[in-house]
């Protein structure tokens, strides 16, 4: 059981800054996902937690202990790699036993042939055998113990890799895109299994993925990373419905969120693509609004509805995606329930949404609603509390 | 329709015929001829021959020089193969970590393997010369007697072995470089997390098993190579001093082309081929149970 505290972690490879100013607290027993596109630094951050990589700046504590300079094997963390990294020459049993033999047996005891004659070896080996077999039983891979990794399917290898990580009962599990080598069906299955495993073990899980679906379905909280920074740390629900930044909003959700430019024309009123809508007090000047496709619905003609023309309709079975173009050529996507009246391609329609479904972004892309709410709060896990200058710099970088 | 079927049946044989013909002419044919000759009393230049059964082989195994030759060859293999193998693995892992200098080191070490053997052996002859060579100079500095290394009975074969190691190290390095760079970094990282974070455990858990297929290959290749040692003996020692460097190929050459006892040379060749063939068979069997990669 361990929490993880990261304080101002940075990492650079030569001139390139991969991570900057990472402040993150992962709670004891939490399932936290590091979500981001490739190259955002999420894997590097995971490797820093594991000890395979050393941070260039900042401090890292696992279970209250500063682990800077402590080797990976002494950190009480286990890692599941994307490629599983099973030892191809060892059987499943031997693979799972490696973390135990390396720790429990001394080097002379590990020697082939002669090792068994050193006192205590037999007893420790029996104990290792019992532990591996019990774990294999619970992971439902006991019948595979004599096989080599090459003789296993993707899902079975995944389970063996999990077993190898679990066998020494670490305080933190690190997973680097462990499901990305599986087919879609197996992935969905393993997703459920991992979530159940987490509930059963109650151990801290840190899970790196670029797949928002994985992050959203399994995690207690998600840390969205972009360009070496953490943009937002929150529950999956809040990440989806209250994104901290335009880029987060665009990254999460499929099909992507509708982004419409807006200008505040007079206090409390904003112009969005030619339609006047009421604006909350914290919205100023220029910026944009985001509307999830499921919230942008077809309505009868009204003052607060955009006239639009349907350019494409996609039938997804349970719902339809209606692609439309507004008067000023802005493209939108609406997700309509399959029982609703579906307009045909070329039809002139009106689109609107409820004001509480609108997500506001200022000119730099930040969500002012969230920023207002967090003013004065000193919660550490809300990593994004940049100053005005930082926000400008970051917006520029993005 | 019949023509078409016939054509389809004949096509593969027709296409492989040139290769098969060449193989029969230049590989299998000579081997069969040599094997046949080894059971006769034919000597170079004679017009008649008669079948003598296994007599040639019998006389060979009664011949002290031939037995010494086999012993020397075995000793030579034992001295060269393991050393070249382990030095190759060691230098390959060093070169792998050398970054920018890697291609330079690779070229430098590979050069002896690429060069013309006889030309380089002439240079070695000069280097080892006790009066005008580098060895004489170094011996003078060290204050030791500049003995003629190639004329000293217990040193000649080890010196030839050293030259062979120098020559073949590059090949061993290049093959191990390929094998070592094929090991994914994740394997070492997984090992590090599992507790194998010192060089010895890392080697035992990851490196050694994952280059085993290269090791087998290099082992057999070097063994066959050492089995065939000829140039260094012919250029530097001619089998001497006192038969200390008499090896199988050199005995074969002497019997065949100095003494014109073609039948005896043929018998040695057959024994030699059985040896090389045996090694090749071992290699094939080992490569069959090749190491598993994911």
Image (cartoon, grey):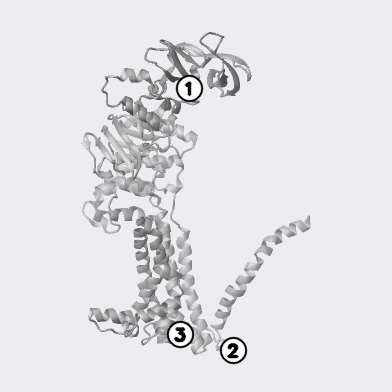
Q: Mark 2 — on which chain does it sit?
A: B
Mark 2 residue element:
loop
Cβ–Cβ under 8 Å for marks 2 and 1: no
Q: Which mark is residue B60?
A: 3
Image quarter of residue B145: bottom left
| Alpha carbons under labels 3 and 1: distance apart | 93 Å
Question: Who's the residue at 36% across and 68% down the image?
Answer: B82
In which image quadrant can residue B223 be found?
A: bottom left
Disc 2 crowd, CA 10 A, few/some/many (<14, 14-19, 20+):
few
Q: Nearer the viewer, residue B127 or B1?
A: B127
Asked if labels 3 and 1 share a chain, the reply is: no
Q: Name the spot of residue B199 as percent of width and height, x first.
A: 29, 55
Query: Toward the viewer: A28 or A113?
Result: A28
Residue B27, x across and y down, in percent: 57, 73
Q: Which residue is mark 1?
A: A259
Q: Residues within 10 Å of mark 3 (few under 14, many from 20)?
A: some
Does residue B55 appear anywhere in the picture?
Answer: no
Q: Nearer the viewer, mark 2 or mark 1?
A: 1
Say whether residue A375 is left or right of residue A276: left
> Could one spot residue A214 in this view of the protein?
yes
Q: Which residue is mark 2?
A: B49
Q: Tell me, yes or no, whether the two marked residues, 3 and 1, touch with CB atoms within 8 Å.
A: no
Look at the numbered disc 3 and give the secondary structure of its residue.
helix
């Amino acid at each position: 059981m361990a929490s993880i505290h990261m304080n101002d972690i940075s990492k650079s490879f030569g001139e390139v800054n991969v991570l900057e100013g990472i402040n993150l607290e992962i709670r004891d027993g939490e399932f936290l996902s590091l979500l981001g596109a490739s190259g955002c630094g999420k894997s590097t951050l995971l490797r820093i937690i594991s000890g395979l990589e050393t941070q260039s700046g900042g401090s890292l504590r696992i279970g209250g202990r500063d682990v800077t300079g402590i080797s990976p094997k002494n950190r009480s963390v286990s890692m599941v790699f994307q490629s599983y990294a099973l030892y191809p020459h060892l059987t499943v049993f031997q693979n799972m036993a490696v973390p135990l033999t390396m720790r429990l047996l001394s080097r002379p005891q590990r020697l082939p042939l002669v090792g068994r004659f050193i006192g205590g070896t037999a007893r420790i080996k029996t104990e290792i055998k019992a532990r591996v077999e019990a774990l294999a039983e619970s992971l439902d891979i006991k019948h595979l113990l004599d096989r080599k990794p090459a003789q296993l399917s993707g899902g079975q290898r995944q389970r063996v890799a999990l077993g190898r990580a679990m066998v020494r009962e670490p305080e933190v599990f690190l997973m680097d895109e462990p499901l990305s080598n599986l087919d879609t069906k197996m992935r969905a299955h393993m997703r459920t299994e991992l979530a159940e495993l987490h509930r059963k073990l109650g151990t801290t899980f840190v899970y790196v993925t670029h797949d928002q679906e994985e992050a959203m379905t399994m995690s207690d909280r998600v840390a969205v990373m972009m360009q070496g920074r953490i943009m937002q740390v929150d529950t999956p629900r809040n990440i989806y419905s209250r994104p901290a930044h335009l880029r987060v909003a665009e990254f999460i959700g499929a099909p992507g969120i509708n982004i419409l430019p807006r200008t505040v024309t007079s206090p409390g009123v904003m112009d969005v693509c030619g339609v006047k809508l009421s604006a909350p007090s914290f919205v100023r000047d220029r910026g944009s609004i985001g509307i999830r496709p499921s919230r942008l619905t077809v309505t009868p003609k009204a003052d607060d509805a955009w006239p639009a023309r349907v350019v494409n309709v996609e039938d997804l079975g349970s719902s339809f995606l209606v692609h439309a173009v507004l008067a000023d050529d802005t493209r939108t996507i609406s997700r309509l329930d399959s029982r609703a009246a579906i307009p045909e391609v070329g039809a002139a329609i009106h689109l609107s949404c409820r004001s509480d479904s609108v997500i506001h972004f200022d000119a730099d892309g930040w969500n002012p609603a969230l920023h207002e709410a967090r003013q004065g709060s000193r919660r550490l896990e809300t990593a994004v509390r940049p100053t005005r200058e930082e926000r400008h710099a970051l917006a520029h970088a993005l | 329709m019949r023509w078409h079927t016939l054509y389809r049946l004949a096509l593969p044989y027709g296409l492989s015929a040139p290769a098969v013909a060449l193989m029969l002419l230049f590989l299998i044919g000579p081997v069969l001829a040599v094997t046949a000759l080894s059971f006769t009393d034919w000597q170079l230049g004679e017009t008649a021959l008669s079948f003598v059964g296994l007599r040639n082989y019998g006389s060979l195994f009664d011949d002290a020089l031939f037995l010494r030759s086999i012993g020397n060859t075995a000793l030579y293999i034992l001295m060269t193969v393991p050393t070249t193998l382990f030095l190759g693995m060691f230098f390959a892992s060093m070169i792998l970590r050398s970054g920018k200098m890697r291609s330079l080191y690779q070229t430098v070490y590979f050069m002896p393997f690429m060069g013309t053997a006889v030309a380089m052996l002439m240079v070695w002859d000069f280097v080892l010369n006790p009066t005008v060579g580098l060895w004489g100079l170094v011996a003078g500095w060290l204050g030791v007697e500049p003995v003629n290394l190639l004329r000293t009975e217990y040193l000649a074969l080890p010196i030839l072995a050293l030259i062979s190691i120098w020559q073949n190290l590059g090949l061993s390095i290049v093959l191990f470089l390929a094998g070592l760079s094929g090991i994914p970094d994740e394997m070492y990282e997984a090992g590090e997390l599992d507790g194998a974070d010192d060089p010895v455990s890392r080697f035992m858990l990851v490196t050694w098993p994952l280059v085993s297929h290269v090791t087998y290959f290099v082992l057999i290749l070097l063994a066959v190579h050492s089995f065939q040692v000829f140039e260094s003996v012919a250029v530097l020692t001619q089998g001497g001093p006192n038969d200390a460097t008499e090896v199988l190929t050199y005995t074969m050459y002497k019997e065949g082309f100095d003494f014109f006892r073609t039948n005896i040379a043929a018998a040695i060749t057959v024994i030699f081929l059985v040896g090389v063939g045996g090694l090749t068979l071992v290699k094939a069997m080992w490569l069959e149970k090749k190491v598993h990669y994911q």
